Amino acid sequence: MTPRSLAALAALLLASTAAASAEPVFNRIASFPVTANKPEGADLASPSSAEIVAASADGMTLAYSDSPAGGVGFIDIADPRAPKAGGFVAFEGGEPTSVAFAGETLLVGVNTSESFVSPSGQLAAVNVSTKAVSATCELGGQPDSVAVAPDGSFAAVAIENERDEEVNDGALPQMPAGFLAVLPLSNGAPDCGAIKRVELTGLSGDTPEDPEPEFVDVNADGEIVVTLQENNAIAIVDGKTGAVTAHFSAGAVALENVDTQEDGRIAFTDQIEARPREPDAVKWLGTDRLVIANEGDWKGGTRGFTILTREGTVAWESGPAFEMELARAGHYPEGRSDAKGVEPEGLAVAEFGEERLIFVLFERGSAVGVYRDAAGAAPEFLQLLPSGISPEGAVAISERNLLATANEADLGEDGGARSHVMLYERAEGAAAYPQLVSLDAQNGRPIPWGAISGLSADPAGAEKLFAVSDSVYSAAPTIYAIDASSTPARITRAIPVTRNGAAAEKLDMEGIAADADGTFWIGSEGDPEKEVPHAILHVGADGAILEEIPFPEALTAGQTRFGTEGVAKIGDTLWLAIQRNWKDDPKSAAKLVSYDLETKEWGAVLYPLDAPKGEGWVGLSEMAVKGDHAFFVERDNQIGDKAAIKQITRVALAELQPAPLGGELPTVEKEVVHDLLPELASLTSGYVVDKVEGFAFDAAGTAFVATDNDGVDDSSGETLFFRLPGL
């Protein structure tokens, strides 16, 4: 596809996501994999990460800390839609923890500690043009966060001297205590001989002898604010004199209507007794207020963010409000319910025109919340932005209407997504994400959802669909009703799938076909190792299982865990698309299994699979019927720039002539009718997601596609939901 046609496609897709609006919105415009900064000949499979990100004064260059790779990377964003690798600077024997620009110099906090009890570190100065280290200052402890005064006169470094979580269950105090280092700057160069060591012991907090400094920020008056995370306190320091001018506890929050149990279901019905906020990132809002991200690390974490006065008075508390926004968009990480939930960690604050915007990064929700600061009133929630996995740092470049996020998780060793830096642009138009959201249930909280693994038309009308969740929510298998007539599309109802009045267990629902009588036919993918059977379920309109049809022995004799991925009803016959070849199949083919609802007879044909184009495997992940053809989603299991096969194929219904199981099976002839990669690349600005798991034609014949976000488990949490006109 040519750049011009791809741009036209992007414009069409954006136009289809929402009505035009004069309100400026952020949309992702580029995704930069940090592996692109590895030098020639380097091991691309070795871990790398983007953690803290900073922007140069002219807004044309980004720099990020890469702890696993032991260095800092640069990105040229002169064209923000086409970021380029800008080079990498390695630090032998050190672990970069944070970066900050000071004119033409990049200041890097480098942890050189031999152990927790013998911490050490440096502040390194890197010439941005030459990429050479021009100076290193010994800090006398382990640096965490670095910030530069707006006037460039000094740098502040939080010296954390972090605790060892293996010692005494991580309880504090653990010496040596951390402190704050302040270094004068001259044209960006640090004066190593004039470091001020600001002691933070004996201040407010739970363990004042061990303050645990975490994050720093500097306001226009040269005042430094520093969070003492595990100590649950905040201090304000005069950057010129090094005097502590204020300190106070970050306080505690009790939470209601949250999910606190990792049990295979999302249920916002629990309570958490008051616990310390334990803030991570902190940013000044002007000179008289602060905003903190309450991640928690030792005893606390309160799942949200808080605005405080400089005296420590709470001006506004989010509580779990953004958790609800994440749940509404399918980004709630159920696997973290018993810990810190969505885990707010990073912050950015910037002036865009006359507005001050707050960006809150949620590490486990893999998303960014955009808020408009309203000074004396509650901040206004504007948008949820999809991010890569585990956003850690962010920087806003308001003069260019840009936002950049650094997403630290690198899942390359497990075949997953690599770490990315992502770019967003603020402009008039429509928000491209989210594309699927849920309405509120009767309890006033969003219908929780995720891991969409199958789609089916609702025979009752156009733009009405049903979907199912897969085994991520093992304790709450659910059918979702979707209204696709609005943008974003809306989940309007959740239908729990039950067995004998209780949530059905040992299911992995991967395919669904809604019948004209209001019932559903669902394919459950089995897993022999987990004693989950391969089966067909006949489910009533209320979600109660009416009948369970296990696969016959003639079929399960060759079973693997890669079972049913799509269901379609053709006349009185159910057809099931099996994801990959079973033990009795050719390696290059997968079964299409038939079950005659009248005669109860089983049969099958073989579907020819494309060979992988590189790593991984290729299989089927959905099935639908329109006219004289059955349509299939055929995809590889690759993500990002490794994704090569994401396509829609079709097979003439006349070819679906099943042969008895156990004998030789005929192979059908397929036709590739649509390549999904252009849509996937455009909708994500290059960050191609893996699992296209939902595909259906509605009652009017319009094709819809949905992706499976794996319940935000080792996933960015993004669910794409879009139309394929003309298919």
Image (cartoon, rainbow, N blue to C red):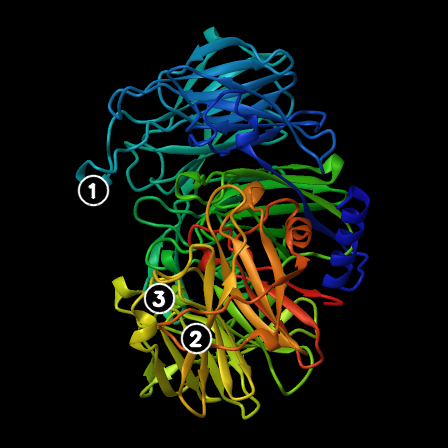
Badge 2 local density, few (<14 within 10 Å), some, or many (20+)? many
Residue nearer the viewer, 590 or 112: 590
Q: Is residue 44 above or below residue 369?
A: above
Q: Is residue 152 above or below residue 32?
A: above
> Sequence order check: which comes first, mark 1 or mark 2?
1
In three-dimensional space, the C-alpha distance between marks 1 and 3, rounded to whole angstroms, equals 27 Å
Q: Quadrant of residue 464?
A: bottom right
> Sequence order check: which comes first, mark 1 or mark 3?
1
Give the residue type that dot 2 points to: Gly
Q: Is residue 378 visible?
A: no
- Cβ–Cβ below 8 Å for labels 1 and 3? no
Instruction: State the SS at label 3.
Output: loop
Residue nearer the viewer, 677 or 298: 677
Question: Residue 411's x, y, as percent?
Answer: 43, 42
In three-dimensional space, the C-alpha distance between marks 2 and 3, rounded to whole angstroms, equals 19 Å
Question: Residue 335's x, y, as percent?
Answer: 37, 58
Q: Quadrant of residue 473?
A: bottom left
Whether residue 470 sits left or right of residue 163 in the image: it is right
Q: Is residue 639 visible?
A: yes
The label shown at residue 523 is 2
Name the residue tied to disc 3.
264
The mark lying in front, picked from 2 and 3, is 2
